Image: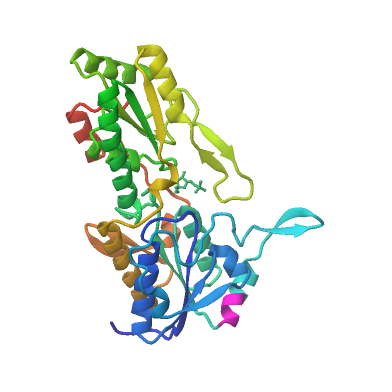
Amino acid sequence: MAKLNKVKTIAILTGGGDAPGLNAVIRAVVRTALGQGLTVWGIKNGFGGMVENQMIQLTDNSVAGILPRGGTMLGTTNRDNPFSYPKKQDGKIVYQDMSVQAMDNLRQAGIEALVVIGGDGTLKIAAEFYQMGLPVVGVPKTIDNDIPDTERTFGFDTAVGVATDALDRLHTTAESHHRVMVLEVMGRYAGWIALHAGMAGGADCILIPEIPFKTDSVIAKIKERQQRGRQFSLIVIAEGAHPQGGEISIARIVEGSHEKVRLGGIGEKLAREIEELTGMESRCTVLGHVQRGGTPTAFDRVLSTRYGVAAAQCVLDGAFGNMVALQKNQIIRVPIVDIAGKANNVTSDNELLTAGRAIGICFGD
Ligand code: F6P
């Protein structure tokens, strides 16, 4: 790896919700950069730490043993946006633009470039800093897999594995009790986790935000199975799924967060409706943050390591303003501004959807 630019000191920041593989990315960036003679700092607690000047120097020893660990050794938050940063004034919270202060903090520490590991909200902020002149490289993180121009975000494979395991476990108890089991999974406004876990776990119905569902179609599927002697059914529903003509289920609105809307509750609503309309006992399991915690799968560890090495290589090449991405099993670079603020959703021609339909899975339409 040839060092083509003059950057000597970089920092790494992890922002937004955590995802399995964050530590593996940090380790790969640190090891690659140190190997090329760079100095590496870690910014603690996301963009808040950049504003508050919370940094630690990262060495080979500081990243030893973190590859299989969930979470992020740097801490993270989806609350703090330097462009609209919460400050207490006269007992009240007011929002101020602290982006210049945050950039100054880096400059004063001698940090010349920033590797930002995050999802859509974090990468959007990274794009704004890039436009202000900060040399930035992005790494796509989220269990939701909803970032454009990359076939995979790290963390997704682990979340799908956890959801698949849950479906396998629900399968045997559903069968024993002749029940309908509804599994609500994360994913925000994208159905990737539900789609992949539903396929892997043999769900009878997969309900995703991209296909508003008809409860009648779900009921018809359950009844059709009953008639064939299958006295139980498994349904996986994405937290952002909603009935045709109906609203998304919101668990809570949280002021002061990048992501104000907390989704949740659609699984329980559907389970109650199914019970009323079929007379079959129905239960809902909400998987929640179990999908995000714990050790990454081998796939996510490898992908995260590839992303980390590629991000460090962008720094070494002076290729700033890019996000590393996976396309056709190659790690490529895409301009951050091209993906900032955009989402990657399941489209109607998705091959997995077509395969699911071919084997009789109901998608609620
Ligand atoms: O974006 C990742 C994600 O886990 C979503 O799937 C989910 O809707 C959201 O974050 C939950 O956020 P929080 O951890 O703030 O409750």
* Position of residue 306 measured from the top left corner of the image (x, y, whole percent): 29, 67
Compared across the picture, whether 22 is left or right of 172 comes to right
Determine the residue positioned at 80% across, 54% down.
Answer: 91
* Position of residue 76 measured from the top left corner of the image (x, y, whole percent): 51, 60
Residue 365 seen anywhere in this rendered image of the structure: no
Q: What coloring was used for the rendering?
A: rainbow
Name the image quarter holding residue 168: top left
Q: Is residue 106 magenta?
A: yes
* Position of residue 198 measured from the top left corner of the image (x, y, whole percent): 28, 36
| Magenta span dominant secondary structure | helix
Q: Is residue 13 magenta?
A: no
* Position of residue 110 measured from the top left corner of the image (x, y, whole percent): 54, 83
Q: Considering only vertical position in the picture, is 36 above or below 92?
A: below
Determine the residue positioned at 42% across, 80% down.
Answer: 59
- Residue 20 or 340: which is nearer the viewer? 20
Span highlighted in magenta in the image: 105-109
Name the image quarter holding residue 309: bottom left
Looking at the rendered image, the quarter that the C terminus falls into is: top left
Q: Considering only vertical position in the picture, is 25 above or below 221?
A: below
Most extreme residue toward the right is 90
Looking at the rendered image, the quarter that the N terminus falls into is: bottom left
